[in-house]
Image: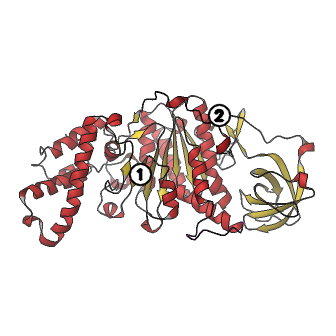
Amino acid sequence: MSDTTNAEAPAALKKGKVVAVQGPVVDVKFTAVEDMPDLHETVHARTFDKRDITLLVAEHLEGNIARCVALASTGNLQRNAVATSSGGTLTIPVGEELFGRIVNVMGEPIDGKGPITTERRMPIHKDVSRVAVNMDHLKGAKTEVVETGIKVVDLLFPVVRGSKTGVIGGAGCGKTVLIMELIHNIVEQHEGACVFTGIGERIREGNELYFEFEQAGILNKLMMAFGQMDEPPGARFNVILTGITLAEYLESTGREVLLFMDNVFRFVQAGAEISTLLGRTPSETGYQPTLSSEVGDVHERIKGSVSAFEAVYVPADDLTDPAVVAIFSYLDAVMVLSRERTQLGLYPGIDPLVSSCSNLNATIVGQRHFDLSQEMLRILTKYDELRRIVAVIGLDELSKADRTLYERARKLQNFMTQPMFVAESYVGKKGEYVKPGEMLDGVEMIIDGRMDGRREEDLYMIGKIE
């Protein structure tokens, strides 16, 4: 892994001038062909109000013009302003000094805690096709399950080290809350390190997240990179690479790494904005023509001991949206948050019948765990059919066997709810961490009929069954 710095000899710096500014897209003209910077190279320009702007070269045009995407606002950037090529790609500082800090896409601190000084810098752009993949970690590798303490996740979507898990749902279904709970539970129990990447999400959420972690005392295990909603598309598109680069650094130190990304759809959205601004013809679905390769390049870089958790916004609750489908294909587990379940107060609102997980296998989780999960899915599938019948003819018209199954399904559904640590201030109930063994015992008791005498309300929003 080669490290580079932005420091270049003054003689190597090649100057050009700004000839056009169209929002976040800036055209820079260089005097000769040999002065032209390469793709992904950084170009620095200064605005009228003495603000430095970093530009990333996106395209080469005729007449020695480099079309660049700005990583900050281009307000007050004037025509004919001097633009200087750095001679290298964008690099960010990496090191232990970044624990507990928040950086932007360029690795600059945005938390008001002073500058970050590190010995190493790493480039955020890499040609995935040229990176040699080390397969040694797969030889005789033992699949190790990461305990999350969230009942429905541990039962139906076991998290395996080095896997990619997607939390998918529409607006207001609880993606960020679930991601925050996963961070809270795993990082507190876990000896490794964590990187949180905020991609195009609300600034309020990033602010709340920081103070939540500070209160929990886990900031010393956490690095954060934010490219939020108010930033230009260049920052929102590239901040995902900043987060992955931090994770790659941590992995190179021999740590187990958890990489949280909220929200990967915003990365695709920023890519579509840039594509339109660069004048590329969109595909027939309205997205950028390079959608598949962009999503693929990002996911191909997440490997080794890096376990990724990705929140994915679903526009208009449409799971067939091309951006969502493109992300789907790289995930080992897909947790789909259902609006209907959220409205019923079943938190976390994961719909087990729409979701899937390739790690739910007897060889990974054990035979008992696998059998209980399959039996629960069978009961919930049958309940889904009976629910429609009950809505028409009522519960009393069901046969005794169907009625028993219907009631057990409702108890299982309630038992899969759980008070969350990160939502304590909203629901007024203390969060619960449930060990997989306690969760399996509870599920077994309900399926076996040992809870038939208990009311379904008794199992709502509890941890383990006492």
| Residue linked to disc 1 | 334
Residue 32: image location, x then y, percent? 92, 56
| Residue linked to disc 2 | 95
Q: Quadrant of residue 244?
A: top right
Name the residue: 28% across, 49% down.
416
Q: Quadrant of residue 396?
A: bottom left
Any magenta on residue 245? no
Q: Quadrant of the C terminus?
A: top left
**Disc marking residue 26:** none
Q: Give the residue type at disc 1.
A: Val
Q: Does residue 258 appear left or right of residue 433 in this picture?
A: right
Closer mark to the observer between disc 2 and disc 1 = 1
Residue 295: image location, x then y, percent? 57, 54
Any magenta on residue 284? yes
Q: Give the residue type at disc 2.
A: Gly
User: How many numbered marks appear?
Assistant: 2
Distance Cα–Cα, label 2 vs label 1? 32 Å
Is any atom of residue 430 visible in this view?
A: no
Name the residue: 63% across, 60% down.
290
Neighbourhood count class around disc 2 (C-alpha, 10 Å): few under 14, some 14–19, many 20 upward: some
Name the residue: 81% across, 53% down.
44
In the image, residue 9 sits, relative to residue 456, either above or below, namely above
Neighbourhood count class around disc 1 (C-alpha, 10 Å): few under 14, some 14–19, many 20 upward: many
Q: Does residue 263 appear left or right of residue 290 in this picture?
A: left
Residue 309: image location, x then y, percent? 48, 46
Range shown magenta: 278-289
Determine whether the residue tagged by mark 2 lies in a helix, strand or loop: loop
Name the residue: 62% across, 61% down.
270
